[in-house]
């Protein structure tokens, strides 16, 4: 088989053929020591063999991913603290003269878990069906990426990693047949939250052009400084060269100890306001409004986001089997917490941008079989966007649906996402029964 070579300005990159797509995997976009800001790096060898999966950043395994998608998030991946890598997937055909639309996936995981090359984020179908390029990136997590502001440790290192990856993509994606003037970020949960916060930062307007914000927990973004201070007290005295296993064990204990902060304690790591490059918390709404016209935005959620957590929280499991009122009480709780964390703040964000002249679409996903208790839950959109036959085999979201129904639902969602990425324009209003409904947000009253 002939070598697949991409000529970047840093030198040639060797890719590989994977079925009907071409991949260039495990490309370093930056380098950084522990607690250092990322800095641009050239390719370590020429030609660079981009033929291995990107190593995942240090983290503890996600029980929810394994329990619901049936796959370990880190399956097939190595772990490395030097994890500033990205992977590119593109069609196995010549691109149009203007280049293909580029979609950059920002994974979720409460800013504490996730990996760009996880098998649950395989972009093959997005690429095959819709003639786009998808870039999966890594960024630092937890104590190593989202807790700083002490002992000269910078805050928001994971966010700075994402920005470094976007600069690399902007500079080099044309070599892979991508259009650097048509880059869309799409991300789920913490990934969507990160995208919303990137919209606050000066200079990012040149790095991407559209944003798809999926199930971002915007309802718990405020008032987390006290929680960060409490965690910092527990880590400030650690030696800088503490081994990774010790850090991850401490991280697990820290997450458990934040339960006293209520709902916010469920995601203790995250964006730290008032530390570079993020503005103070009090200025956030004003800056979003000032920058509303910079990007086309699609934002949405699933109808029953917090049903995801039922199998993993004993009191909720118990409530579901209480005779008479147990199930209805659980559904009320799912609705109220979905409203509090996702739906209501998502609507407010959409109105805020649209009221300032931004182009905004709002959606909600209702997909799932009626007899499947986890229908329309947080992360169901992961199965729809990336749901290969192999992923559907192990996912609890498949229950009550035929393979043909699964494949058709995923194809519909992928077409909507990629149409928005390609043009920034959707129908003013559309409803696909049992799957998704979306509309354009025209002003701040809708």
Image: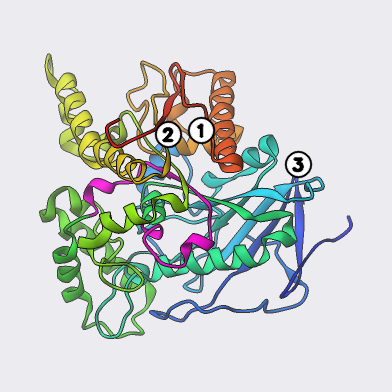
- The residue pinned by badge 1 equals 384
Q: Which residue is at 20% across, 55% downward?
A: 222
Expressed as whole percent of the image width and height from the top left, the position of residue 112 reads 35, 59
Expressed as whole percent of the image width and height from the top left, the position of residue 193 reads 36, 52
Provide the residue span drawn in magenta.
197-221
Disc 2/disc 3 C-alpha distance (Å): 25 Å
Q: Which residue is at 71% across, 60% downward?
A: 174
- The residue pinned by badge 3 equals 20
Q: Give neighbour class at mark 1: few <14, some 14-19, many 20+ (Cα, 10 Å).
A: many
Q: Secondary structure at mark 1?
A: helix
Q: Give neighbour class at mark 2: few <14, some 14-19, many 20+ (Cα, 10 Å).
A: many
- The residue pinned by badge 2 equals 380
Disc 1/disc 2 C-alpha distance (Å): 7 Å
- Are the residues flagged by discs 1 and 2 in contact, CB closer than 8 Å? yes
Q: Secondary structure at mark 3?
A: loop
Q: Secondary structure at mark 2?
A: helix
For the rendered model, the colour scheme is rainbow
Expressed as whole percent of the image width and height from the top left, the position of residue 429 reads 45, 24
Disc 3/disc 1 C-alpha distance (Å): 20 Å
User: Going by the image, does 300 lie left or right of 328?
Assistant: right
Q: Is residue 265 magenta?
A: no
């Amino acid at each position: 088989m002939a070598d697949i070579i991409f000529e970047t300005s840093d030198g040639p990159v060797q890719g590989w053929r994977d079925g009907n797509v071409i991949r260039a995997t495990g490309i370093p976009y930056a380098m950084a020591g522990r607690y250092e800001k990322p800095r641009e790096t050239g390719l370590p060898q020429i030609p660079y063999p981009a033929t291995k999966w990107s190593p995942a950043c240090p983290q503890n395994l996600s029980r929810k991913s394994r329990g619901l998608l049936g796959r370990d998030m880190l399956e097939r991946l190595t772990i490395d603290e030097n994890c500033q890598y990205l992977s590119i997937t593109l069609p196995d055909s010549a691109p149009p003269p203007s280049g293909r639309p580029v979609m950059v996936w920002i994974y979720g995981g409460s800013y504490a878990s996730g990996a760009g090359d996880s098998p649950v984020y395989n972009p093959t179908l997005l690429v095959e069906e819709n003639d786009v390029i998808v870039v999966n990136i890594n960024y630092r997590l937890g104590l190593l990426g989202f807790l700083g502001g002490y002992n000269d440790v910078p805050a928001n290192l994971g966010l700075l990693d994402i920005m470094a990856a976007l600069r690399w993509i902007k500079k080099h994606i044309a070599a892979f047949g991508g259009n650097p003037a048509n880059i869309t970020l799409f991300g789920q949960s913490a990934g969507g939250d990160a995208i919303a916060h990137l919209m606050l930062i000066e200079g990012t307007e040149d790095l991407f052009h559209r944003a798809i914000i999926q199930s971002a927990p915007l309802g718990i973004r405020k008032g987390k400084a006290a929680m960060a201070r409490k965690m910092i007290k527990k880590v400030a005295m650690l030696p800088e060269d503490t081994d990774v296993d010790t850090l991850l064990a401490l991280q697990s204990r820290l997450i458990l100890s934040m339960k006293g902060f209520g709902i916010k304690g469920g995601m203790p790591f995250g964006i730290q306001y008032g530390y570079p490059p993020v503005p103070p918390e009090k200025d956030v709404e004003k800056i979003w409004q000032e920058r509303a016209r910079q990007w086309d935005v699609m934002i949405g959620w699933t109808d029953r986001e917090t049903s995801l957590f039922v199998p993993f929280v004993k009191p909720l499991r118990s409530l579901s089997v209480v005779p008479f009122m147990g199930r209805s009480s659980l559904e009320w709780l799912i609705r109220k917490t979905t409203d509090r964390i996702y739906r209501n703040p998502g609507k407010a964000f959409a109105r805020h941008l649209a009221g300032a002249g931004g182009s905004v679409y709002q959606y909600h996903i209702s997909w799932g079989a009626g007899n499947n208790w986890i229908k329309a839950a947080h992360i169901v959109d992961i199965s729809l966007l990336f749901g290969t036959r192999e992923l559907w085999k192990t996912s609890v979201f498949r229950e009550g649906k035929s393979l043909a129904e699964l494949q058709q639902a995923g194809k519909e969602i992928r077409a909507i996402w990629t149409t928005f990425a390609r043009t920034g324009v959707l129908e003013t209003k559309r409803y696909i029964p049992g799957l998704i409904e979306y509309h354009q947000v025209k002003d701040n009253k809708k």
